[in-house]
Image (spheres, rainbow, N blue to C red):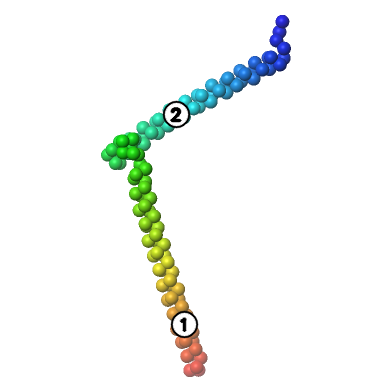
Amino acid sequence: MSKPDYIQDLETRMTKLEICQKERRQVEDNMMVEQADMKRMINQIHICLMGTDYEKNGGLVSEFKTVKADVKKLKIWKTRIVTIGSTVSAILGGLITFFATRINGLKELLK
């Protein structure tokens, strides 16, 4: 006696589900292996650059904080310099325009 259609359908669905779960587990395993490799590479780079172990030194986070603070300071100075430059150029432009109109006015009077 053969199994009813709905039982066979359920069995095929369960088989497909098990296959999908195996594939998902395989992908997760591969990702974990890749993450471990990346962590090992980061550790080697950190040892090469900093001379200390990535894990023992607390990672690159401390270095990033100081670099980020330095970049922030540079951005503030850059903003200040650009603001001062814009102000000076506006003042000079205004002075040049003022004197140019005065000179043109004098030329008109002398004609």
- Mark on residue 50? none
Q: What is the CA distance from the residue labelled 2 to the residue labelled 1?
A: 71 Å
- Residue extending farthest bottom: 110
Image mark count: 2
Q: Residue at x 43, y 30 (%)?
A: 34
Q: Nearer the viewer, mark 2 or mark 1?
A: 2
**In the displayed structure, does residue 20 sit left or right of residue 53?**
right
Left or right: where 32 falls relative to 16: left
**Is the residue 9 above or below the residue 86 in the image?**
above
Place of residue 5 in the rendered image (x, y in percent of width and height, measured from the top left): 72, 14
Asked whether residue 47 is in view, the answer is no
**Residue annotated with mark 2:** 32
Corner quadrant of residue 40? top left
Above or below for 109 versus 76:
below
* SS type, badge 1: helix
> What amino acid is labelled 1 in the image?
Phe
Quarter placement of the N terminus: top right
Q: Are marks 2 and 1 in contact (CB under 8 Å)?
A: no
Residue 106 horizontal/vertical position (percent)? 47, 90
Kindly identify which residue carries mark 1: 98
